[in-house]
Image: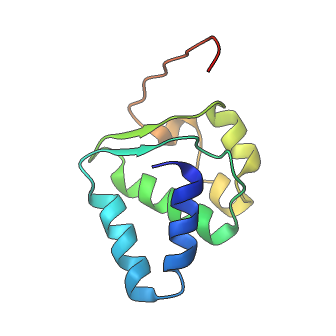
Amino acid sequence: MRMDVLARKLLIARENGRDHDALLERLREADLLIVDDFLTVGLDQNIASDVYGVLADREHKLPTMIVSQTDPSYWVQVLPDRVAGGFNRESVGEQHEVAVAGRS
């Protein structure tokens, strides 16, 4: 799922607590979670906390693929302070980086 779509879905779901909880649960339990264009859109504190919470809950349990044109050091810079404090290269867990060069 593209980051902008995920952020919009989380924002809309926040209007109804039950929908919000159900969406977070689906993201936490997906066999494979792929987030494309990670952090190419700005996130408010609530959405950033939701995304971080899902990623943290999946760590060491289920595979997650983050596709981004930036690296984790940039993510820490743009995430709200409360979220960025818990998000660093080590918190990504078992990671594999694949650098792709060229035109897109």
Q: Position of residue 92 (x, y in %)?
A: 48, 39
Return the residue nearer the eye: 80 or 36. 36
Q: How is the image coloured?
A: rainbow
Residue situated furthest front in the rendering: 104
Q: Where residue 66 appears, x then y in whole percent?
A: 48, 38
Residue at 51% from the left image edge and 68% from the top image edge: 9
Q: Position of residue 101 (x, y in %)?
A: 61, 11
| Residue 35 higher or lower than 81, as above or below | above
Is 11 left, or right, of 97 in this rendering?
right
Question: What's the residue at 56%, 35% (across, down)?
Answer: 89
Residue at the farthest top position:
102
Q: Residue at x 51, y 34 (%)?
A: 67
Give the percent coordinates (x, y) of residue 18: 38, 86
- Which part of the image, by quadrant, shows the C terminus? top right
Residue 36 to residue 28: above or below: above
Is residue 100 found left or right of 61 in the rendered image?
right
In terms of image quadrants, where is residue 76? top right
